Amino acid sequence: MNDSSVGRVAGDAGHGATLHPAPASSPEGSQGGESRGDGTPWPSEAYGWYVVFILCICGMVAFIDRQIINLLVEDIKRDLQLSDTQISLLQGLAFGLFYAVMAVPLGRLADTGRRNRVIAVGIVVWSVAAAACGLARSFWQLFFARMFVGVGEATLTPAGFSMLADLFRPQRLALPLSVYTGSSFVGSGVALLVGGFVIAQLAALDVVVLPLLGELAPWEAAFVIGALPGFVVALLFFLTVREPPRRAASVAAGQAAADPDRPTVREVLAFCARHARVFAAVYVGISVLAAVQFSLGAWVPAFMIRNYGWTPSDVGYAYGVIFLTAGTAGVVFGGWLADRFQEGGRRDGHLRVALISALATLPFTVAFPLAGSAWASIALLAPAVFFGTMAFGAGPALIPVISPPRMRGLLVALYLLVANIFGQAGGPYLVALFTDRVFGSPELVRYSLAVVPALLLLLGAALVSSGFGGLRAMRS
């Protein structure tokens, strides 16, 4: 698709966006990319995909540090004397709330600072904090260590989305963003597979001795070992990824898009308010759908251990393969399908994919915890993950497409704020709350997993549907 066929939204900052054709451009520049709307050539897509690859590696490392706690639930509960609800706070709130809150100032930094440096420093911060999780001796020590894992990881997505939007034309952006988003599921799969293997090896030892740190319990050593790859990745990113120039977007603009100055929070919130139905659908609707996958990631390992007698390594291998295959395929397919809808003239394509995702996931989330056998549950869990992750390949990719370029980082950060409060923090907590307070027994987590995700999927589908009209009006 040539730039002559790419639309540019241009309108007064106080009015709705209006679609206008972009001027034609000829290829120029040593990289052979097509010209952006401001006359500067796009980088070659080969380099753009290299940056996607490196960001995917960063995302995988991040999810190893983020998710390994889910395999260690029973050991942590035993050693620190915690309830399911306290564990859910470590899985969700400690990480998710501070990840979300810090994403906002870090999103502003992504709009003005050197994004490659922001990401490299963030990787070092979360790696140090992840190792510190293994040194915690109480609930609050582990809570604060998890908090700083969230703070470090909050650098990655706002800066990463912003960089990719300066490397790919808008009609080609959903697929690279969905591939990058999909790296989180690869990371989750790797975390489960590698974590399961490491835990199996460490479980044979009563005490693990690590250089400088001395004697550690196996679950403590697992945190430390899982943090080590982050330091290598931080160096690789800093040395090989250059800062791309910020230039005008070719789809979402408005008067603010031509202004290179940093936007105020009031301007950003005013933009969201003008398009409230769209941002409610993306920010809240997609976040509620995200809560489903976060709740599964947090509690499926405990469900398999408590109800079927599996070991953490058993769960890691089986669930890890599901994340690597079904999770990654689902999120990439969601981005691909959104692009196809867009190219076919369906302006609501991103939200349409999210709605399909919610409705297709519903029967499998209800069925898998009630299946009655371990392998039947695993078989039903795979399509629940595949269909459920389609929404993540489509929904968040809409944000940079409809956003003025100088607001992208902050708008993505606001999405992360909402998504992590509702998703990362809310999903695991709701399942634990139902298990502790409604069903009253750890073994009955199976019923919590049948009820809570189903309710969230129905709510998310309703919220996503409410944005269709607003998106068509915004881009007409």
Image (cartoon, rainbow, N blue to C red):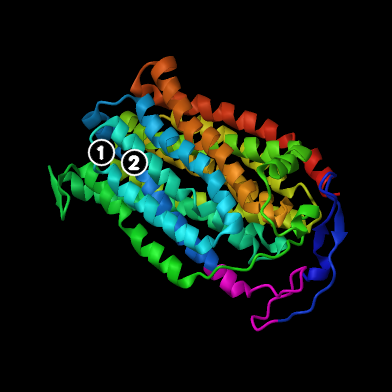
Q: Main secondary structure of the magenta part?
A: loop
Residue at 61% of width from left, 52% of height from top? 409
Q: Picture coordinates of residue 349 (x, y %)? A: 73, 49
- The residue that appears at 39% across and 22% down in the rendered structure is 444
* Residue 187 lies in the magenta-colored region: no
Secondary structure at badge 1 equals loop
Q: Amino acid at mark 2?
A: Ala
Write down the region rendered in magenta.
29-50
Residue type, label 1: Ala
Check if mark 2's residue and mark 1's residue have beta carbons within 8 Å. yes
Q: Is residue 427 left or right of residue 83?
A: right
Residue occupied by mark 2: 145
Q: What is the crowding at mark 2: few (fewer than 14 residues within 10 Å), some, or many (at least 20)?
A: many
> In the picture shown, does residue 31 fall above or below 145?
below
Pointer 1: residues within 10 angstroms few (<14), some, or many (20+)? some
Task: Residue under label 1, please give it.
Answer: 136
